[in-house]
Each structure stands twice: as structure tokens, then as C-alpha cells.
Image (cartoon, grey):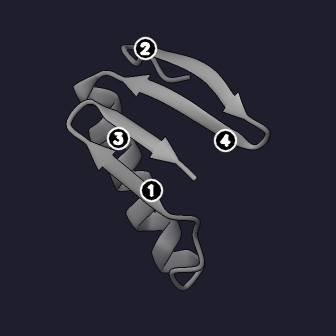
Amino acid sequence: MPKGMSSRFQQIQQNCYYIELSSNAIVLLQHSINSAAILRKNRLRSLLPFEHTIVLA
């Protein structure tokens, strides 16, 4: 994980994690998602941002 990024992971069920990220980490993740979406032609799993938390489903 890049410097300055902190996170806490909790597996809530198989293949589903609740993740808390810092504001800086969310910005970096959003940029990564945007880049990946362009490269993969938007074939990504849903990411639902809620302020300082993101749920990967």
C-alpha cells in the first residue's frame, strides 16, 4: 500500500469486504478506478463510495 494510505479491512462474507480508507486513499482509489475503467472498457465490479468508506460488492 502506498505511503500515507491507511486502511482497515473486515471480511463480512465470502468475497465481500468492508473497508475503511483515509480521504487521501479514496482519491487515489478513484483515480485508479477511472484509469482501470478506461483500460477495461468499464468492465469493473460496482464500487459504492460513502464519504470515507467504500463497499466492494
Identify the element where label 3 is drawn: helix
Front-most of residues 27 and 56: 56
Sequence order check, earlier mark of 1 and 2: 2
Q: Residue at x 58, y 65 (%)?
A: 45
| Neighbour tally class for label 1: few under 14, some 14-19, many 20 plus, Cα within 10 Å | few
Which residue lies most toward the front here?
13
| Neighbour tally class for label 4: few under 14, some 14-19, many 20 plus, Cα within 10 Å | few
Tag of residue 16: 4
Q: Residue at x 34, y 33 (%)?
A: 53
Which residue lies most toward the bottom here?
41
Identify the element where label 1 is drawn: strand
Look at mark 3 in the image and give the residue it sits on.
Answer: 28
Q: Is residue 42 above or below residue 19?
A: below
Look at mark 1 in the image and give the residue it sits on.
Answer: 47
Q: Do the residues labelled 1 and 4 touch (CB within 8 Å)?
A: no
The three-letter code of the residue at mark 3 reads Leu
Mark 2 vs mark 4, foreground winner is: 4
